[in-house]
Amino acid sequence: MSKIGIMGGTFNPIHFAHLILAENAYDECKLDKVLFMPSKKPPHKLHESIVKDEHRVQMIDLAIKDNPHFELSSLELEREGITYTADTLAELNIKYPMDEFYFIMGADSLFQIEDWWHPQNIFSLTNIVAAVRDHATRKELDKQVDYLANKYEAKIHLLSTPNMDISSKMLRQNIRLNKSIRYYVPDQVVRYITDHNLYAIVEDNNGV
């Protein structure tokens, strides 16, 4: 049985906070590998401008190519319709019934996860690995973990990872304002963004 981490998101664009979170989850949870899984149409971002799938795939590939335990997964990109985590986990558990999955998220998602599609299914199909964030105290996080564990029998691990207040939205805004994103994003991803003129203008909902 392998222990597989799942790092989901739009990665629009991928940045160092994603990579550090995934690496810390790999190390603390003794994972065999971490799958970077870009979402196609996440329900909470249906009105957000997301660049084309091929651009996000290329940026992820550039960011993780030197890490032997990071892999790109196109599972969600290949599925039509709105991308629901519960559906993804169900598909993974059918395809790989002998593996154990660890879904990696920011701690803020712990307070929102009951609004996700079929949260009970999510908790029954995966372990949750959450990064501590400054928006909540450790006491508040522990209380939420206990609540979810009691209500859903959720298995939740809080990472001792450093807080990095970086968001893809902030980076897109910096690019549109012609501000540097160096040291927030791997150099090869910065070059890709520049070479393909990504995020320099406000895109329509189909990306560029």
Image: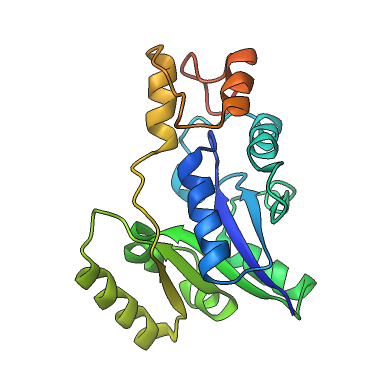
Residue 115 vs 200, above or below: the answer is below
Residue 78 vs 27, above or below: the answer is above
Residue 162 lies left or right of residue 30; in this view the side is: left
| Residue plotted at (55% across, 81% down) | 124
| Residue plotted at (30% across, 81% down) | 147
Of 182 and 46, nearer the camera is: 182
Q: Quadrant of the C terminus?
A: top right
Residue 16 vs 31, above or below: the answer is above
Residue 26 position in % (x across, y down): 58, 63
Residue 130 position in % (x across, y down): 42, 64
Please tell me in which quadrant of the rendered image residue 174 appears: top left
Residue 92 position in % (x across, y down): 71, 68
Of 208 and 104, nearer the camera is: 104
Residue 141 lies left or right of residue 61; in this view the side is: left
Q: Quadrant of the N terminus?
A: bottom right
Please tell me in which quadrant of the rendered image residue 33 appears: bottom right
Of 22 and 40, nearer the camera is: 22
Farthest residue toward the right?
95
Q: Give the tally of numbered discs.
A: 0
| Residue plotted at (64% across, 14% down) | 195
**What colour-coding does the image apply?**
rainbow
| Residue plotted at (72% across, 52% down) | 68
